Image (cartoon, coloured by chain):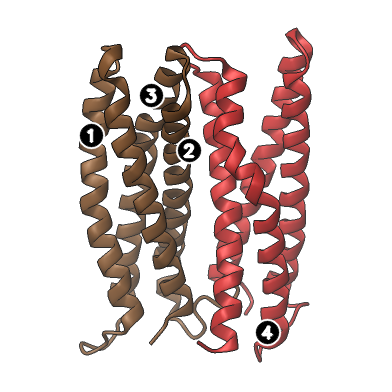
Chain colours: A brown, B red
């Protein structure tokens, strides 16, 4: 982070701050969602299972989704403010877009499943299945964004 | 990848892990405040557990590779004000975070007003750690005076 943008124009700093903050929030909330939902998967006590599933699903809706939006808006704003030439297409930026776009799709699926899962929590029999799917999606997203963090900082050619 | 790329990646990765853990602890606080039928302490412990494993390593990695970068990169010095303040804030954040953890652990072993007081103390320390982290992030990006 010390030299994230040596020689960057000054109007890039605020959008970059939002982008990095959004990325940290995104990774953090994904970890929480995955932790809660995986823990629910392993627990036996129905009350604990319900509580952890609810926490995990609400974290997707109230944590992961807004963090993704902040990260993505910050990314677009940073790119626009950086004033790159038209033929500027480095591998790290491409990788960032691929993970962000695929991540958007997976996040959207997770959000839909979280909404359905939260409704179904009133019916104890069906409580676990959607939570397990969302737990798997959260882990997938977590891994993809970890790769994106590597690409954004190490900037491989 | 060059040495610089690796140093930067490891520094940022450490900072991300520290930030991720900070967020997980806030979620644990919220989960304990709104347990929705479950045991608040058990829920908070469950959510905070992965963060407990990595928070110290994240802070240490960010610190070590941050110092290394400041020495390695021409034009940066450890005594540049924004770097010096960032290092001090990282130590403050790590110390306050550790104090917050001790307060929450102590609160779990007590009851009544004593436990409430310890939880409040833990939240205060955690707030200090979180604000310090946010300021470090801003300093790293805005680099005032650089």
Q: Residue B91 vs residue A74: left or right? A: right
Q: Which numbered disc covers residue A54? A: 3
Q: Is residue A142 above or below residue B72?
A: above
How would you rate the neighbour count of disc 3 (Cα within 10 Å): few for under 14, some for 14-19, many for 20 or more? many
The residue sitting at 78% across, 33% down in the picture is B102
**Marks 1/3: CA distance?**
12 Å
User: What residue would you read off at disc 2?
Assistant: A35
**Could you say whether the residue bearing mark 4 is in a helix, strand or loop?**
loop
Measured Cα–Cα span from mark 3 to mark 4: 47 Å
Question: Which residue is drawn at the image coordinates 24% and 29% (left, top)?
Answer: A115
Chain holding disc 4: B
Q: Residues within 10 Å of mark 1 (few under 14, many from 20)?
A: some
The relative height of residue A151 versus residue A68 in the rendered view (above or below) is below
The chain ID associated with circle 3 is: A
Location of residue A92 by image quarter: bottom left
The Cα–Cα distance between marks 2 and 4, rounded to whole angstroms, is 39 Å
- State how far apart marks 2 and 1 are (Cα): 17 Å
Is residue B36 shown to the viewer in this render?
no
How dense is the environment of label 2, judged by Cα within 10 Å: few (below 14), some, or many (20 and up)? Answer: many
Q: Closer to the camera: disc 3 or disc 2?
A: 2
Question: Which label is found at residue B76?
Answer: 4
């Amino acid at each position: 982070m010390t030299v994230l943008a040596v020689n960057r124009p000054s109007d890039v700093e605020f959008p970059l701050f939002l982008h990095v903050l959004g990325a940290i929030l995104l990774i953090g909330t994904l970890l929480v969602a995955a932790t809660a939902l995986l823990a629910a998967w392993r627990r036996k006590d129905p009350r604990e299972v319900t509580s952890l599933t609810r926490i995990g699903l609400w974290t997707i809706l109230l944590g992961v989704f807004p963090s993704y939006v902040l990260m993505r808006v910050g990314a677009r704003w940073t790119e626009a403010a950086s004033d790159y030439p038209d033929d500027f297409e480095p591998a790290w930026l491409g990788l960032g877009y691929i993970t962000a776009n695929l991540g958007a799709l997976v996040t959207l699926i997770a959000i839909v499943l979280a909404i359905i899962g939260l409704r179904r929590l009133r019916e104890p029999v069906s409580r676990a299945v959607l939570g397990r799917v969302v737990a798997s999606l959260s882990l997938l997203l977590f891994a993809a964004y970890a790769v994106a963090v590597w690409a954004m900082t190490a900037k491989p050619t | 990848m060059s040495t610089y790329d690796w140093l930067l990646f490891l520094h940022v990765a450490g900072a991300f892990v520290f930030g991720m853990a900070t967020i997980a602890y806030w979620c644990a606080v919220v989960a304990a405040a709104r347990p929705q039928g479950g045991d608040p302490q058990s829920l908070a412990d469950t959510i905070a557990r992965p963060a407990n494993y990595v928070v110290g390593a994240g802070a240490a990695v960010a610190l070590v590779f941050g110092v290394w970068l400041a020495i390695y990169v021409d034009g940066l010095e450890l005594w540049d004000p924004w770097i010096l303040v960032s290092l001090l804030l990282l130590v403050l954040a790590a110390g306050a975070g550790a104090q917050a953890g001790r307060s929450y652990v102590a609160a779990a072993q007590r009851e009544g007003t004593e436990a409430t007081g310890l939880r409040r103390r833990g939240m205060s320390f955690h707030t200090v750690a979180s604000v310090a982290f946010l300021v470090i992030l801003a300093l790293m990006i805005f680099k005032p005076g650089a």
